[in-house]
Amino acid sequence: MSGDAPARLIVIDWGTSNFRAFLVDTASGEVLDSRRSASGLRALSQSEFPHYCASQTDDWREGGGAASGAEKVPVYLAGMVGSARGWHEAPQLELPVTAADLAQNVVAAPGLDDVWIVPGVKQVTPEHVDVMRGEEVQAFGALALAGVEGGDCCLPGTHSKWARLDAGRMTAFNTMMTGELYHAVRFHTLPGEPAREDAPFDEGAFRLGVSRAGCPGGVMHALFEARSRHLYAGLESPQIGSFLSGALIGEEVRAMTAARPELDKVYLVGADSLRQSYTIALEASGIEVEAIDSDRATLAGVIAIAARHVRY
């Protein structure tokens, strides 16, 4: 294998529930082809990872590796694929971390040549213990796309991440279990019982939920209001899911603005559906939002890491 910059890369974001692969032109960042499936970590045994990766990428890998065209296209993987329950465990680096640090600590994935797993990050202090896999790549990629070396990123999801970067280094992050709590409350509690069926996003109910963040009694009371408002204040069954989402996302934003009083702008990295609701909650708190698509952020982050990785 060579240290030359490859003309193309294959970038794979492999999480617990989903597999997303992109064939990318490294010079332009253009996505030449992509594949997605529900074959995340839950769907595969450890021995199946190299076989599944090969089945999805072998036709992409031929004839487009190093500038000479003599090698296969290299593959870089990010996300939970690098956890102990994934293909092969990659380290989680202690903060502060740069993109170059991630590049220097990529791990060769066993079973296939020139396939690399990007490490995660961790923060372990007496005051704060936290871990991350995958979102660190998106945070670096988001700032690269924005053309800045520092800022605050909000990366919503099952376990939302708020990352702070300064002068090209990730210096702090927080994980908020907003998405997982939403699912638990909606499908496994009394207040969520009328919201079991799918319903469209209701902006009015969501904004009402956001407004209840920080109310007397805190988020524990705000969540129960989904029931009491359903009984006596006109909150209809199809609105309850949006109200619960608003209360939880509103509490997430409230908690982070309390923790970071200087916060006035965030780079919001996610899919369209989540960006819409988070933008409402963030702007309601007076925070400026710059939205960045999560796929674009992943690709930009991995390209930056691959450019710093000496393949050997």
Image (spheres, rainbow, N blue to C red):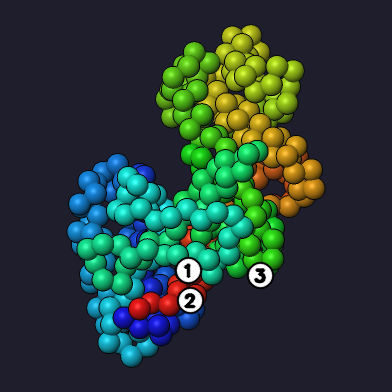
Q: Most extreme residue toward the front, as rendered?
A: 126
How many residues crowd around disc 2 within 10 Å: few (fewer than 14), some, or many (20 or more)?
some
Q: Are marks 1 and 3 in contact (CB under 8 Å)?
A: no
Say what amino acid the circle numbered 3 marks.
Answer: Gly
Nearer the observer, 159 or 287: 159
Residue at the spot of label 2: 307
Q: Is residue 10 left or right of residue 125?
A: left
The answer to which of marks 3 and 2 sits earlier in the sequence is 3
The alpha-carbon separation of the residues under discs 1 and 2 comes to 8 Å
Q: Is residue 164 left or right of residue 112?
A: right
Numbered label attached to residue 103: 1
Residue 206 visible in the current orientation: no
Residue at the spot of label 3: 147
Q: Are marks 1 and 2 in contact (CB under 8 Å)?
A: yes
- Quadrant (top left/top right/bottom left/bottom right) for the N terminus: bottom left
Instruction: Look at the numbered disc 2 and give the secondary structure of its residue.
Output: helix
The alpha-carbon separation of the residues under discs 1 and 3 comes to 20 Å
Q: Nearer the viewer, mark 3 or mark 2?
A: 2
Nearer the observer, 135 or 28: 135
Q: Are marks 3 and 2 in contact (CB under 8 Å)?
A: no
Say what amino acid the circle numbered 2 marks.
Answer: Ala
Q: Is residue 197 above or below residue 105?
A: above
Say what amino acid the circle numbered 1 marks.
Answer: Ala
Image point (73%, 26%), residue name = 214
